[in-house]
Amino acid sequence: MSKRNVTVRMKADYEYEASNLQGNVVQMDMYDAPEKKAQSPMDLLLSALGGCSAVDAVSMMKKKRKTVEDFFIEVEGDRNDGIPAFYKSIHLHFVLVSPDAKEEEFAKVVALSVEKYCSVASSLNSKVTHSSEVRKIA
């Protein structure tokens, strides 16, 4: 089993920064437009799902020796109206621009990417646990 760790630290009331052990940093904020400067945590979840699926799909198409001229995924999440405002459903629309790829083979690659290889998609079905502590300043 492999573990990953990130630390999320408050920068201001609606601004947070997440960093991993390698020092890579992601900014987050919960502002509404036009004050928004970074993605929200829920935006980042969609971005992570799209990014994970993209890497797998492009890699598999290249292994099939297909030309990838352009590739993108439009990710749309439908959120619950109440609190918590979780995603009730998420739709990924994969677009491949390629002169030599066929629709059927790309559809199979997309299915494999999302249903079998994407760790983020699989993680959306995992159990989440939590703990807490209060530290007092001496």
Image (tube, rainbow, N blue to C red):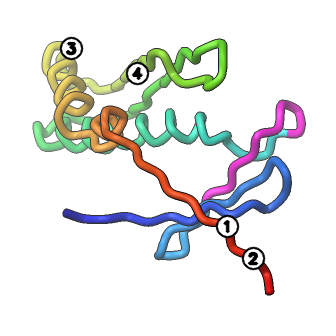
Relative height, residue 137 to residue 27 (above, below): below
Report how far apart the C-alphas of labels 2 and 4 lie in the structure: 45 Å
Q: Quadrant of residue 72?
A: top left
Q: Which residues are magenta?
A: 26-35
Q: Residue at the location (88% across, 39% down)?
A: 35
Viewer-nearest of discs 3 and 4: 4
Q: Which residue is mark 2?
A: 136
Question: Can the viewer see residue 54?
Answer: no
> Relative to the observer, which residue lies in front, 29 or 71?
29
Task: Inspect the image, locate mark 3, and give the three-letter code of the amino acid beneath it.
Answer: Glu
> Relative to the observer, which residue lies in front, 131 or 126?
131
Give the number of the disc on residue 134: 1
Q: Which residue is mark 4?
A: 92
Q: Secondary structure at mark 3?
A: helix
Task: Inspect the image, locate mark 2, and give the three-letter code of the amino acid beneath it.
Answer: Lys
Q: Residue at the location (50% across, 33% down)?
A: 46
- Main secondary structure of the magenta stretch: loop
Locate residue 62 relative to residue 49 in the image: left or right: left
- How packed mark 3 is, by other alpha carbons closer than 10 Å (few <14, some 14-19, many 20 or more), is few
